[in-house]
Amino acid sequence: MSVAAAREPDMKLDAVRGRLAYGEPMSRHTHWRVGGPARLFFVPADRSDLADFLRALDPALPVYFVGMGSNLLVRDAGIEGAVVALGRAFREVTRSEFSVEAGAGLPCTALAKACSSWGLGPADFFAGIPGTVGGALAMNAGAFGGATWDSVHSVETLDRGGVVHRRPRGQYRPGYRQLDGPADECFLAARFEFETTPQTGRLRSLMAERRRRQPLNLPSCGSVFRNPPGSFAGELIEKAGLKGLREGAAEVSTKHANFIVNHGGATAAEIERLILKVQARVRADCGVTLQPEVRIVGGVPEAAP
Ligand SMILES: Cc1cc2nc3c(=O)[nH]c(=O)nc-3n(C[C@H](O)[C@H](O)[C@H](O)COP(=O)(O)OP(=O)(O)OC[C@H]3O[C@@H](n4cnc5c(N)ncnc54)[C@H](O)[C@@H]3O)c2cc1C
């Protein structure tokens, strides 16, 4: 069934209490401001609403869990499945001694601020990562020498059958901007074990450093490529002379070469073609094949140049 044909309401989902939309444009939910419609888009009212939704859903329909879409390129054809976004109902953050329990919908910056006010860390690096705790867990997001899973004690997840699991850290293998572990589950919350850290004002200086180095005035998804072992993707892209390279309204940032910015009205196809061009040119220039850090979902891949 095409995404457009799927706008027919599904009666089995009538009982859900959260926001349910058919054919929701994903451009409203991604930082790049691009992306076609999701067949179903759901923001659950709370945990039990999410569990009810998953149980009522056709088991054959793929489900994609998202946070703030700050690391997502959704293709223009959209997503042939259900997209679940954890919103305000999943933003609790509580502390008990050195443990911090954070909902998967909590913005990373809010986690950094809460930990800073409690004198706990290391969590300053979360400041300025424009995603949720759930997205940070899935990506093992990190910056300035810190990474999400460095302090994770355990996580709570929900499976497709609507069953909650408390999973210890040992069930996951975090890597550089990636995570292996139980698949097809939604993160609901994480428990971090931190240490006491002095209040140094580092949080503010890290935010200032981001503003200085990154093109934060235009839509982007942060670093497009992972850093290859021993070097920086941005340096290789700059060395290949690709700053300012354009596909329509998508451009390799002139401020930070590992960012692709949307000057307004770019399509996902333009961004993907630019990603492929950068990959091909860097490979030709220095023999390194850059691997995307951004998650590309939906539709059909663009052809390589
Ligand atoms: C300006 C800018 C700066 C950035 N700086 C950094 C940085 O310094 N370091 C860094 O690591 N990243 C950075 N990013 C990228 C991005 O913010 C992170 O990857 C972030 O962790 C993604 O979180 P999100 O909530 O937006 O996830 P999304 O982009 O919505 O999703 C990313 C992945 O996580 C999965 N996911 C999201 N929520 C859940 C959940 N609850 N359960 C299961 N899976 C889930 C999705 O399925 C997807 O595969 C930056 C992005 C921008 C735009």
Image (cartoon, rainbow, N blue to C red):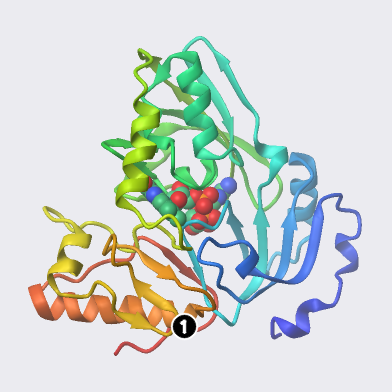
Q: Is residue 183 visible?
A: no
In this rendering, position of residue 154 left or right of residue 225:
right
Q: Is residue 115 above or below residue 239?
A: above
Q: Is residue 145 above or below residue 121?
A: below
Q: Is residue 181 above or below residue 205?
A: below
Which quadrant is the C terminus positioned in? bottom left
In this rendering, position of residue 300 left or right of residue 92:
left
Mark 1: give few (<14), some (14-19) or many (20+) Cα within 10 Å. many
Q: Residue at x 74, y 48 (%)?
A: 50
Which quadrant is the N terminus positioned in? bottom right
Q: Amino acid at mark 1?
A: Ala
In this rendering, position of residue 274 left or right of residue 13:
left
List the residue tagged with mark 1. 269
Q: Which one is nearer the viewer's eye here, 249 or 163?
A: 249
Whether the residue carrying mark 1 lies under 8 Å from ligand 1 is answered with no
In this rendering, position of residue 66 left or right of residue 304:
right
Q: Residue at x 63, y 68 (%)?
A: 26
Q: Secondary structure at mark 1?
A: helix
* Quarter of the figure with residue 158: top right
Q: Is residue 88 visible?
A: yes
Q: Residue at x 67, y 69 (%)?
A: 60
Farthest residue toward the top?
97
Residue 128 position within the rendered picture, expressed as x and y whole percent measured from the top left: 44, 42
